[in-house]
Image (cartoon, rainbow, N blue to C red):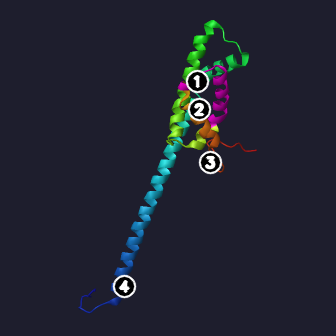
């Protein structure tokens, strides 16, 4: 109980103290809630950054050149003897890059919808090429589950990482 200078009890001061205590508790709870929201948003932001970095690895000059050589060979349906080692190197390089992306995707380290939007068409196309080249399945242990998982991922309503063009 509060006492004023003259020693008389002041009920309004007691009520003010209680109100301040309640407001302080509410502020602490709000602060904890805000901190939890910030942690969640930070994790989401990090997952997006990891996904964009993974997608960027499939946009490098070296990757695009290797993928293009694979695609041209596939479309021409001709593999000459001197070009076979280059094709194998290109296939291994492209699979290794997609294997890294697949690990991030399959273990839910990166934003799955960003990766799916950026990689699904090329991964689907590459899968057909791998079949045509009889690429061994033991070297595709992450690639094939990656393709299946992306095909089943529901990204409706997810925020796209691509910029939308104004009409």
Q: Which residues are magenta?
A: 118-138
The residue singled out by tag 3 in the image is 159
Whether 158 is among the magenta residues is no
Question: 120 and 11: which one is in front?
Answer: 120
The answer to which of 63 and 70 lies nearer the viewer is: 70
If the image is split into quadrants, where does the N terminus sit? bottom left
Disc number lying in front (1 or 4): 1
For disc 3, the neighbor class at 10 Å (few under 14, some 14 to 19, many from 20) is: few
**Which residue is disc 2 drawn over?**
144
- What residue is disc 4 on? 15
Q: Residue furthest top?
A: 82
Give the distance between the C-alpha atoms of the residues marked 2 and 4, in whole angstroms: 67 Å
Q: Residues within 10 Å of mark 2 (few under 14, many from 20)?
A: some
Q: Is residue 59 left or right of residue 13?
A: right
SS label for mark 1? helix
20 left or right, relative to 120: left
Disc 1 target residue? 63
2 or 3: tag closer to the N-terminus: 2
Q: Earlier in the sequence, mark 2 or mark 4?
A: 4
Query: Split into 4 quadrants, where in the image is the C terminus?
Result: top right
The percent coordinates of residue 122 (x first, y second) are: 65, 30
Q: Disc 1 and disc 4: Cα gap in Å? A: 70 Å
């Amino acid at each position: 109980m509060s006492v004023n200078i003259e020693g008389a009890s002041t009920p309004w001061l007691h009520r003010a103290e209680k109100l301040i205590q309640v407001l302080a508790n509410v502020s602490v709870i709000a602060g904890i809630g805000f901190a939890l929201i910030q942690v969640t948003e930070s994790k989401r932001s990090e997952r997006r950054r990891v996904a964009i970095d993974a997608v960027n690895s499939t946009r490098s000059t070296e990757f695009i050149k290797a993928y293009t050589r694979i695609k041209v060979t596939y479309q021409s349906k001709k593999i000459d003897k001197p070009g076979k080692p280059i094709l194998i190197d290109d296939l291994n390089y492209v699979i290794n890059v997609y294997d890294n992306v697949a690990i991030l995707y399959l273990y839910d380290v990166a934003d799955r919808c960003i990766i799916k939007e950026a990689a699904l068409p090329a991964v689907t196309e590459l899968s057909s090429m791998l079949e045509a080249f009889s690429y061994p399945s033991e070297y595709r242990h992450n690639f094939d589950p990656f393709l299946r998982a992306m095909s089943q991922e529901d990204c409706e309503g997810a925020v796209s990482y691509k910029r939308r063009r104004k009409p």
